[in-house]
């Protein structure tokens, strides 16, 4: 029997909200997301925790009383909390002075949540996830100065996060300006120049970096690439991960069929497929190793948990318990191949006033 107990296995709660709403399907409640996560089980193994979007209607980030409610609620399902998503979309990172200030304020509130949850002992690891809240089209109007603006906003956000002992992870996704290709992502991170910022890799989104969606000049795989050419795909993944792995501090296990998808108000981005989708282009457990191991094949142990992000799954799919069992089984395979064992330590719980 495989005894690896790290990285911990988390499920994301925000797919109950993202891509839902009046112009799509209704949101799925926070309680329902927790119930389905906690109910998943494969050969006695269960999810260890959840990554949480600090988004309404699940969480009201403006109400600090929500912190204890959130801790108590998640703990009641015998789950921990990991990475938190900061709701920064009201003000683009390359927007006006006022918009950028709003962005930073949302990061500050998220960091308060994060630090208090750590003090409560329910959040042993994880970062604060951000993006540019800007489109590739708007970024492309003035790439140089817009990258400078994003970097300035991220720097100020990093300084705020440092006050709370938090790290920020910028999600690489083709729909976010300045991080819509692997090269623009690196340019942005290098321009920020802060020790507490890194990259959040999602296997679905980063697959489309290989194809140059929204920035063809940065594609890695050739035009008219045949997905049956596994050797070329593997080499492309090596190129991509060698460039971004040194920055990676948060990681989403995912599948993608090589297409883009959007629902509700969410822009088209890498399609998140079910774990066992026959059209999926990734060998999930094997390809996760490109992110979890260095060039020499050694484990990086750069993060203590990995998360599944089922964004824009239909409600019908999400409300089937088998969906989450299949996801959990896939994540267990990732840990069997690329995990490690550490003696468990009881968290130090401090009194939070």
Image (cartoon, rainbow, N blue to C red):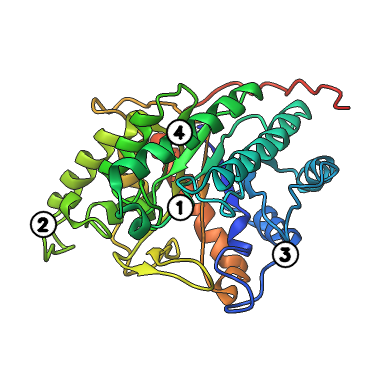
Above or below — where is 246 with respect to 271?
Answer: above
Classify 10 Å Cα crowding around label 3: few (below 14), some (14-19), many (20 and above): some
Q: Position of residue 164 (x, y in %)?
A: 66, 25
Residue designated by label 1: 330
* Front position among marks 4 and 3: 4
Indicate the quadrant where residue 193 lies: top left
Q: Residue at x 64, y 43 (%)?
A: 106
* Front position among marks 2 and 4: 4
Residue designated by label 3: 29
Looking at the image, tell me whether mark 2 or mark 4 is earlier in sequence order.
4
Q: Toward the viewer: 303 or 264?
A: 264
Q: Residue at x 38, y 52 (%)?
A: 177
* Front position among marks 3 and 1: 3
Q: Are marks 3 and 1 in contact (CB under 8 Å)?
A: no
> How many labels were placed on the picture?
4
Above or below — where is 261 with respect to 22?
Answer: above
Q: Secondary structure at mark 3?
A: loop
Above or below — where is 143 with respect to 340?
Answer: below
Q: Secondary structure at mark 4?
A: helix
Q: Are marks 2 and 3 in contact (CB under 8 Å)?
A: no
Looking at the image, tell me whether mark 1 or mark 2 is earlier in sequence order.
2
Q: CA distance from mark 2 to mark 3?
A: 42 Å
Classify 10 Å Cα crowding around label 2: few (below 14), some (14-19), many (20 and above): few
Q: Residue at x 63, y 63 (%)?
A: 16
Which quadrant of the rendered structure holds the C terminus?
top right
Looking at the image, tell me whether mark 1 or mark 4 is earlier in sequence order.
4
* Front position among marks 1 and 4: 4
Q: Position of residue 295 (x, y in %)?
A: 24, 28
> Mark on residue 152?
4
Q: CA distance from mark 3 to mark 1?
A: 24 Å
> Mark on residue 222?
2
């Amino acid at each position: 029997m495989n005894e690896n107990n790290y990285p911990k296995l988390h499920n994301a709660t925000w797919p109950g909200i993202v891509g839902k709403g009046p112009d799509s399907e209704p949101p799925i409640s926070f309680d329902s997301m927790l119930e389905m996560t906690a109910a998943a089980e494969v050969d006695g193994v269960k999810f260890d925790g959840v990554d949480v979007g600090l988004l309404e209607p699940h969480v009201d980030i403006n109400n600090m009383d929500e912190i204890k409610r959130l801790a108590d609620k998640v703990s009641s399902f015998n789950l921990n909390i990991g990475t938190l998503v900061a709701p920064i979309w009201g003000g683009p990172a390359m927007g006006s002075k006022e918009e950028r200030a709003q962005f930073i304020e949302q990061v500050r509130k998220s960091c308060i949540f994060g630090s208090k949850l750590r003090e409560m002992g329910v959040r042993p690891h994880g970062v604060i996830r951000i993006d540019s809240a800007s489109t590739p089209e708007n970024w492309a109007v003035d790439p140089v100065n817009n990258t400078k603006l994003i970097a300035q906003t991220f720097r100020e956000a990093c300084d705020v996060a440092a006050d709370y002992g938090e790290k920020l992870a910028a999600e690489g996704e083709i729909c976010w300006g300045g991080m819509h290709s692997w090269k623009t992502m690196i340019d942005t991170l290098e321009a920020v120049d802060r020790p507490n910022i890194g990259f959040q890799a999602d296997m679905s989104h980063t697959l489309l970096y290989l194809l140059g969606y929204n920035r063809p000049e940065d594609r890695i795989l050739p035009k008219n690439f045949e997905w049956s050419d596994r050797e070329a795909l593997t080499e492309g993944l090596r190129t991509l991960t060698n460039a971004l792995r040194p920055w990676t501090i948060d990681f989403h296990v995912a599948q993608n069929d090589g297409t883009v998808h959007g629902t509700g108000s969410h822009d088209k981005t890498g399609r998140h497929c079910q774990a066992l989708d026959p059209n999926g282009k990734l060998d999930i457990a094997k390809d996760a190793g490109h992110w979890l191991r260095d060039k020499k094949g050694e484990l990086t142990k750069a993060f203590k948990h990995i998360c599944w992000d089922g964004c824009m799954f239909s409600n019908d799919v999400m409300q089937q318990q088998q969906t989450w069992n299949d996801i959990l089984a896939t994540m267990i395979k990732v840990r069997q191949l690329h995990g490690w064992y550490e003696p468990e330590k009881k968290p130090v719980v401090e009194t939070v006033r």
